[in-house]
Amino acid sequence: MKLSRSLILDMSAGPVFHVALLFSAFLLFRGHNAPGGGFIGGLVAGAALVLRYVAGGADEVHRTVRVAPELMLGLGLALAVLTGVAPWLVGDQFLESAKLSVDLPLLGTVKTTTALPFDIGVYFVVVGLVLAVLRTIGGEE
Amino acid sequence: MNVLVPLPVVLPLLAAALSLAAYGRTTLQRAIGLVTMTATCAASATLLTLVIRDGPMSADLGGWGPSIGIVLVADLFAVVMLAVSSAMVLAVLVYAIGSPATGDSAALFHPVYLVLAAGVSASFLTGDLFNLFVAFEVMLSASYVLMTLGGRAEQVRSGMTYVVVSLLASTLFITAVALVYAATGTVNLAELAVRMPDLPPFVRDSLGLLLLVVFGIKAAIFPLFFWLPDSYPTAPTPVTAIFAGLLTKVGVYAIIRTQMLLFQSDGPSPLLLSIAGATMLVGVLGAIAQDDIKRILSFHIVSQIGYMILGLGLFTVAGLAASIFYIVHHIIVKTTLFLVGGIVEQATGTGALRRLSGVATRMPVTAVLFLVPALSLAGLPPFSGFVAKLGLVEAGLAEHRHVIIGVSLLVSLLTLFSMTKIWGGAFWGTADEAAFVNAAPNRSGAPALMIAPTAVLVAASLAVALAAGPLYGVAESAAESLIDAGAYVRLVTGP
């Protein structure tokens, strides 16, 4: 059964999607109480993709993100695990993190932690999972 | 050297990630799985030799101290389990790659299987009750996928029971963790061991009982075993074999770990001994009533869990050592039996005894591979099961527990009976060539990659019997370190 499409939803899905993605990136770097929130950021990005799905169906999601969900999940998980292992190279414990302060052009001094790649990994795991769910149980067949 | 401690968890997890990224490329996935599990086996074996030589190790994750962060503890019991389990994971992986029908054809098999391996390792290594919950969840969510891989209707039906029961157990578990935290203010096992004795006896006993129920569901002890014989046989053979060999034993491990560390009693525990007796008896009676190889073997898992709990229930070094030896013997033998059951099913298309006949004539190699672990399971000398059961009997007699020892001997006889039932039903008789539709044209009736890992495991169980003396020595020192909870506490919190 094909539902009739809602004009309002169709038109607003686009702008809202981008705002939501920006917000998810903000959450990724900031967390709900500093530093870093890969999981919550991923959830917001996932919700944005679900909005795309509700407005335009599985094809629309596929057009938006062309990366295979498994690849995104796998690379995200690999990034997270490697971040955990990295401290071994400098003789620290598994998952140990350090504070980091970088001077960037335009942004000035940015303080972050070495756990950031871990959060980015988690972010992609969550988004990849949402994509996999949308494709598996959201596709038409 | 405590870099080694997290490796058995990290390696499979990283490999699972890469395997996911290689989705759809089966050859690459196989290579990733084999290389990683070989490396994990090597890491576990190294850990085992280091711990035997230098004593237990611990690692504070993230460099946080034990009361804030999470610790991994590699004591002798943990690394023995780790070494055996990673070897099983590797052997079954080879078997899965070698099976034409029930193997690793689903693209999700490899990543999820590796996640399962990581979860099992993490359950053995963790020194933190909440983290044990996390490890259980990692292991269980992987097992949900593996159990229903292929998506046949009966798999989904029995997978449903499995998922619901496991989720219920997880809910109880997280509740128990919350209650423990509320009562003591910590979830670190070593700190719990210090604080538990100060609790009022009623609170302490309630928490002990609650955790026993939680892990009892996972370990399939009486009366919480009902879900197991129904769900295990429907999964693909490699999956059933690894579940049968490892998952219930992770439950037993958690029971032993928590009972010894947190709720140790001075003498034999009547509760645990009665549970052990009932589990043995009900399991074996269930097995006798079945008519399918995998179902018989599934009921035997339940029955065998009873023996492990029996050794724990005695609360003596001898009893625990026998339990640990029993677990090692059981993991190897049980996995092998399921692999052989899978080979017969693969060759004939059925596991039902009344439709099988003459397997020993058509597939003599497979018959030998069945006979050795079957006799070992029943506890006949000179196999590893005999050593394990002898240890239990001696430990029980030393405590004058004649009734439970009598029950365990009776159950051994019944085990032998149901093994002869499989032998007589499936292996003896005349071979009808038409029945062996998928059998390979050789004396084992199966591809070499299915036979080889099975044969290696049979050889391993024989080696356990041959090297019983030194291995029993290791089990005894593992038992001594379990009895002495103080050593665990000193290791984690520092002197």
Image (cartoon, rainbow, N blue to C red):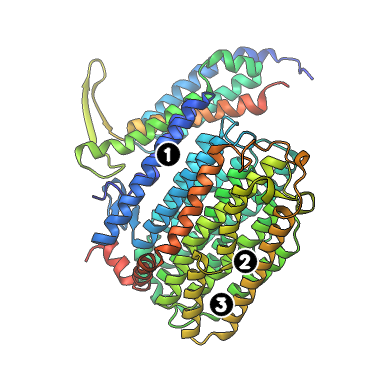
Q: Between marks 2 and 3, how big is the CA–CA gap? A: 14 Å
- From the image, state whether disc 2 or disc 3 is nearer to you: 2
The residue at 43%/32% (across/down) is: B32
Label whose residue precedes the other's in the sequence (2 or 3) = 3
Secondary structure of the residue carrying numbered label 3: helix
Query: Which numbered marker is on residue B273?
Result: 3
In the image, residue B287 above or below residue A62 = below
In the image, residue B93 above or below residue B171 = above
Secondary structure of the residue carrying numbered label 2: helix
The amino acid beneath tag 1 is Leu
Q: Between marks 1 and 3, how big is the CA–CA gap? A: 38 Å
Q: Position of residue B396 (x, y in %)?
A: 50, 81
Label whose residue precedes the other's in the sequence (1 or 3) = 1
B73 horizontally vs B448: left or right? left
Q: Between marks 1 and 2, how big is the CA–CA gap? A: 33 Å
Q: Position of residue B330 (x, y in %)?
A: 52, 61
How many other residues sit within 10 Å of disc 1, few (<14), some (14-19) or many (≥20)?
many
A68 horizontally vs A99: left or right? right
The amino acid beneath tag 2 is Ser
A112 horizontally vs A25: left or right? left
Q: Are marks 2 and 3 on the same chain?
A: yes
In the image, residue B21 above or below residue B103 = above
- From the image, state whether disc 1 or disc 2 is nearer to you: 2
Mark 1 = which residue? B13
The amino acid beneath tag 3 is Leu
How many other residues sit within 10 Å of disc 2, few (<14), some (14-19) or many (≥20)?
many
Q: Position of residue B9 (x, y in %)?
A: 39, 45
